[in-house]
Image (cartoon, rainbow, N blue to C red):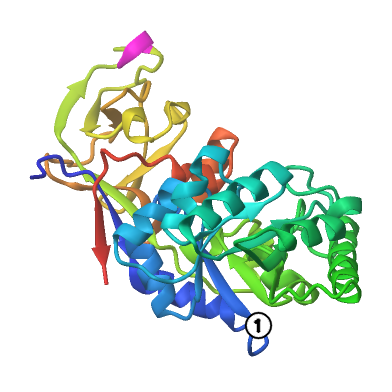
Amino acid sequence: MKFRPTVAEIDLGAIRHNVEALGSFLAPGVERLAVVKANAYGHGTVEVARAALDAGATRLGVALVEEGIVLRDAGIDAPVVMLVEPPLEAAKAVVEHRITPSISTPAAAQAVSDAASIDGSTIAVHVCVDTGMHREGMDYERGVAFVGEVASLPGLEVEGVWSHFALGEQAEHPFTARQIELFAAFCDELSRAGIDVAVRHLTSSAGIVLYPASHFDLVRMGIMIYGLYPDEALRARCELRPALRLSSAVSLTRRLGAGEGISYGLTWAPERDTTIANIPIGYGDGFARMLSNTGDVLIGGKRRRIAGRVTMDTLMVDCGDDDVSVGDEVALIGSQGAETIDATEIASRIGTINYEVVCSIGPRVPRRYIR
């Protein structure tokens, strides 16, 4: 049962469009992995996963074992690749739910091998090698030997090897070019060592567009399948459709006299009499408190400035002398009339990235899917 009008509408047609748009940059035979970690960047894990698979993705990417289990419990059988090494104690669950773990350490390799051996099964693993990001992955110099060691363990099949860009959203960056060279050399060394690996992957969203040499056997499609750009320069290179629209409705209006403060701390007061509209969404829903007195929303197709501090459950906006009524729609992310506020604009106002804006939309906000 839902009473509050606040909702995130997810356009699954946009998800499908974006997967296909990124796929147009790929040579035949290059697989597409759709990254659906963090509740599909706030868009909804299961629904997004199904839409991405419908559009041609062949694998799904997660960060947590629990995220992989959610997909399996929903009846999704596509390969699920963990992009973070699982905790040792999760090895049994990884095997039981046929999740493909990322392996960077001998301890994790042994734990998964032990679990697979007890289960009497063989599990595919992807070994991560560090080519310069220095977040996860086996040390580059040890990488080839480590892949051989993992491949020798019972119950494990080294299906893939991978690495991650540090600066992949920047065009023609020498560091990224060097990472591509290192990864290609690593794969060549594996071949010379007689180690066959079917799936080599390096690039995420931006690199699909900017670095064709990084595609290898599989690409990881992340933020761009949601219609958001990791760098605004990419907008001219690939036409995407935003998948998320966050809206609510006016719950209360009041006239506020000139000089009268509003909200916690009384940090804002109008210079003239004005109409204030209350909107039932706040930082408890992931709408950033840092937007206090600086962010905008759309009502009646016009921008309205947030007035005073965003609270846990409510924010207020200055509507001047316009005729605004209870029940009027409010667009917080998305379009209304000719105006648009997107996650990138919000991110720029609070000093973060659009990834964080959409990932922060919390579970109190229901998702409504447009198919």
Query: Residue at 36% of width from left, 61% of height from top?
Result: 72
> For the magenta stretch, what is the residue range?
262-266
**Observer-nearest residue: 25 or 249?**
25
Figure quadrant of residue 307: top left
Residue 270 appears left or right of 125 = left
Residue 367 appears left or right of 254 = right
Figure quadrant of residue 23: bottom right
* Magenta segment main secondary structure: helix
Q: What x and y, as percent, mark residue 36?
A: 46, 58
- Please identify the quadrant where the N terminus is shown: top left
Query: Residue at 51% of width from left, 70% of height from top?
Result: 59
**Observer-nearest residue: 350 or 189?**
189
**Observer-nearest residue: 23 or 252?**
23
The secondary element bearing badge 1 is classed as: loop
- Please name the residue that numbered disc 1 is placed on: 26
Query: Residue at 80% of width from left, 76% of height from top?
Result: 213
Query: Residue at 91% of width from left, 52% of height from top?
Result: 141
- Please identify the quadrant where the C terminus is shown: bottom left
Crowding at mark 1 (Cα within 10 Å: few <14, some 14-19, many 20+): some
Residue 264 highlighted magenta (yes or no): yes
Q: Is residue 151 above or below residue 344?
A: below
Q: What x and y, as percent, mark residue 102?
A: 63, 54
Three-letter residue code for mark 1: Leu
Residue occupying the far bottom of the picture:
28
Residue 286 shows in this picture? yes
